[in-house]
Amino acid sequence: MLGNLQDKVVIVTGAGQGIGEGIAKVFATAGAKVVVATRTRENGQQTVNDIIAAGGEALLIQADVGSREQVNNIVAETVAHYGQLDIVIHNAAVFPMVSLEELSDENLDHTLAVNLKASFWIAQAALPHFRTQGGGRLLYTSSVTGPRVAMPLTTHYAASKAGLNGFIRTASLELARENITVNGVEPGYILTQAMSLLAGEEGLKEMASQIPKGALGKPEDIANTMLFLASDEASYITGQTIVVDGGSTLSESPKVLNDFYERGA
């Protein structure tokens, strides 16, 4: 069965809402014991409650992944509770929109800590446990912003995600002989509560009109791709990132694309 994770233990950071919540719930449905690691306890507890209500198993660990000590604690608590660790998904990210000129050291440092440095920290904390068990999976939520496309007011975010893709490729080489794969997913525009609040109804419609599929993605679209990468069927894939964006990075010009569809081609 594709994506059968029965009795596997997975950590999902940023699992209190949005894409991370979707990942946590899909992995629980696939049989995994899910550690919901999130900064906001209320959001994380709701994810845990939803998983348990659906017949799954989940554990809440409140943590700020911008701290190496707290990242280490996530892994330590997970292993202490479940006795094993099979999959780590670093999904948590911050996205403060600010111009390059106005970007403060505080904003830059926080973005790099949460989005990029935590990718190193959680891998380093997980590796001893993966080695003891004979393998494991490291998965990361990257983005099309940075590696594929650019957007004003996101130089710090784009740099963190481009750096993350470089980390994925290089770490995969170092760990390939140990049955530890390292992969990622690059989401495009995904419809989350935060996206809805940021863009509003009209903004969401405009975004959808720029996407070849004609709609924003859902958190489950990212979660299902992660599920494949975590599965036994993906054991020969490492050092890769999969773009999940409804085709939004394919078109040279959204206007030309819309004109094409309006002609009924």
Image (cartoon, helix red, strand yellow):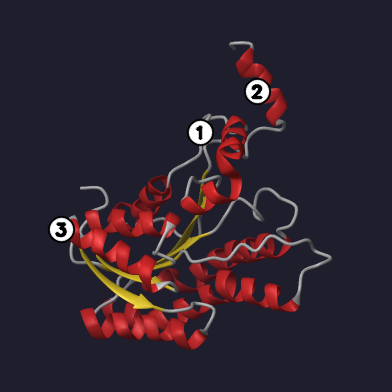
Q: Residues within 10 Å of mark 1 (few under 14, many from 20)?
A: some
N-term-proximal mark, 3 vs 2: 3
CB under 8 Å between discs 3 and 2: no
N-term-proximal mark, 2 vs 1: 1
| Residue visible at 53% across and 29% down in the picture | 214
Q: Is residue 143 left or right of residue 220?
A: right
Residue on which the image places disc 1: 215
SS at mark 1 in the image: loop
| Marks 2 and 1, how far apart at CA | 13 Å
Amino acid identity at mark 3: Gly
228 or 202: nearer the viewer: 202
Q: Residues within 10 Å of mark 2 (few under 14, many from 20)?
A: some
SS at mark 2 in the image: helix
Residue on which the image places disc 2: 258
Residue on which the image places disc 3: 55
Residue 124: horizontal and vertical position, in percent? 46, 81
Amino acid identity at mark 1: Ala
| Residue visible at 50% across and 33% down in the picture | 215
Question: Does residue 66 lie above or below 139 as drawn?
Answer: below
**Which quadrant holds residue 205?**
top right
Residue 158: horizontal and vertical position, in percent? 67, 59
**Which quadrant holds residue 30?**
bottom left
**Which quadrant holds residue 7?**
bottom left
Q: Residues within 10 Å of mark 3 (few under 14, many from 20)?
A: few
